Amino acid sequence: MTLERTYIMVKPDGVERGLVGEIIKRFENKGFQLVGLKFLSPTRTILEKHYADLSSKPFFPGLMTYMTSGPVVAMVWSGKGVVKAGRVLLGETNPLASLPGTIRGDFCIDVGRNLCHGSDSVENAEKEIALWFTEGVVSHNRVVERLIYE
Ligand code: DAT
Ligand code: MG
């Protein structure tokens, strides 16, 4: 079975606030599988590609400043429906509109400090994984798979 994959990133505020473990924990608890993980200081170049669709937005310069303010944790998670479910775990783009129980609903307030990124479609997920993980991700058959999927 080839499972869906998504690109999840803990943004600089999430790293600085010590929420990396908390964010990873929520994806692990759900049953999704971590297949790519790295800690890096993103360049403007990679961020401009990642956020290319937002380049004309008024908040784009601020977004670039925020995203280059410190290191991020880049991850690839795999699992059934992980793109959509990952967005549910993250919450709404605007944290104040995010329900408690979601990462943004529980831990942040402003849209420009919303802790984490999650791909918004399967197609964009694959593009983002190709952009951030040029070296590829791991391939591993988990022993627990049959306890998570029927
Ligand atoms: P998401 O991150 O939920 O996919 P998006 O792709 O529309 O949301 O925007 C990317 C990031 O840009 C978002 O996480 C925070 C920032 N952003 C979006 N809308 C914004 C706004 N109105 N004001 C300030 N920052 C914004
Ligand atoms: Mg987005």
Image (cartoon, rainbow, N blue to C red):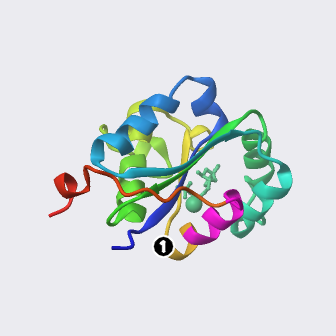
- Looking at the image, which is closer to me, 6 or 1? 1
Residue 124: x percent and y percent?
57, 71
User: Image height check: is 137 above or below 3?
Assistant: above
Name the residue located 63 percent from the left edge and 71 percent from the top edge: 127
Q: Quadrant of ligand 1?
A: bottom right
Left or right, 78 with reference to 40: left
Callout 1 amino acid: Val
Quadrant (top left/top right/bottom left/bottom right) for the N terminus: bottom left
The residue nearer to you, when weighing 82 against 84, is 82
Magenta: main secondary structure: helix
Residue 121 or residue 61, whichever sits in front: 121
Name the spot of residue 145 as percent of width and height, x first: 26, 56
Residue 121, image x, y percentages: 49, 71
| Element carrying mark 1 | helix
Part of the protein shown in magenta: 126-135
Q: Residues within 10 Å of mark 1 (few under 14, many from 20)?
A: some
Residue at 38% in and 69% down: 3
Residue located beneath label 1 in the image: 122
Q: Position of residue 87 (x, y in %)?
A: 42, 56
Residue at horizontal 29 percent and vertical 40 percent from the top: 29
